[in-house]
Image (tube, rainbow, N blue to C red):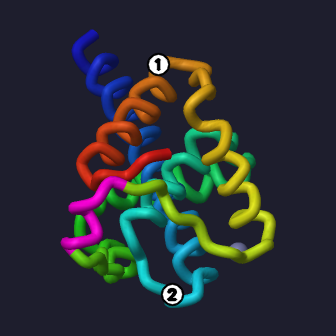
Amino acid sequence: MEEKIIQSQNLMLQVILANTSSAMKISKTLSEHSDDKIMRADNIICGLVYRLMTPMTDEEIEESMHSAEDILFNDSSSEDEDNNDELVDDIKDFEISRKVKTNNCNCNICSHTRVCLLNFNDYIPKDELGDKFKKSIIETCHKYNKII
Ligand SMILES: [Zn+2]
């Protein structure tokens, strides 16, 4: 019985990690497609919004579940691949409240991100997990003084 609980907790954790790591991938693409190629809080927020509102393809689910499994169970080996991007942001940038910035790229991911941002406030998550993600995005925005 207890083992079952632990298993389902692990699966839940894996799903959360899978979502987050997939969102980070989107954020990375958004920053790479921006003019200055810098990873900013805006890109992170946009990546999370994109992931919340856009269902993953089967391929993406499989890939993210694998990388989540790596993080959960092999703690060290694959860690340094993706975590090199430091958040480069001017602290002053957070002092004034302003709208989340997007880039001007017209590829599928970037233009779809802009559509997601426009619809974010009216979006109703489909499940409890989505609900948690939406809340955490709103909290992140408060923290960085951003408005969607
Ligand atoms: Zn793009």
> Between tags 1 and 2, which lies in front?
2
Q: Amino acid at mark 1?
A: Glu
What is the secondary structure assignment of the residue under circle 1? helix
In magenta, the rendered stretch is: 91-97
Mark linked to residue 128:
1
Q: Amino acid at mark 2?
A: Lys
- Residue at the bottom extreme, as displayed: 36
What residue is at 33 percent from the left and 58 percent from the top? 71
**Image: 60 above or below 78:** above
Which quadrant of the figure contains the N terminus? Answer: top left
What is the secondary structure assignment of the residue under circle 2? loop
Percent across and percent down for residue 49 are 54, 47
Q: Is residue 96 left or right of residue 42?
A: left
Asked if residue 135 is among those painted magenta in the image, a careful observer would answer no
What residue is at 23 percent from the left and 15 percent from the top? 2
Asked if residue 92 is among those painted magenta in the image, a careful observer would answer yes
**Label 2 beta carbon less than 8 Å to ligand 1:** no
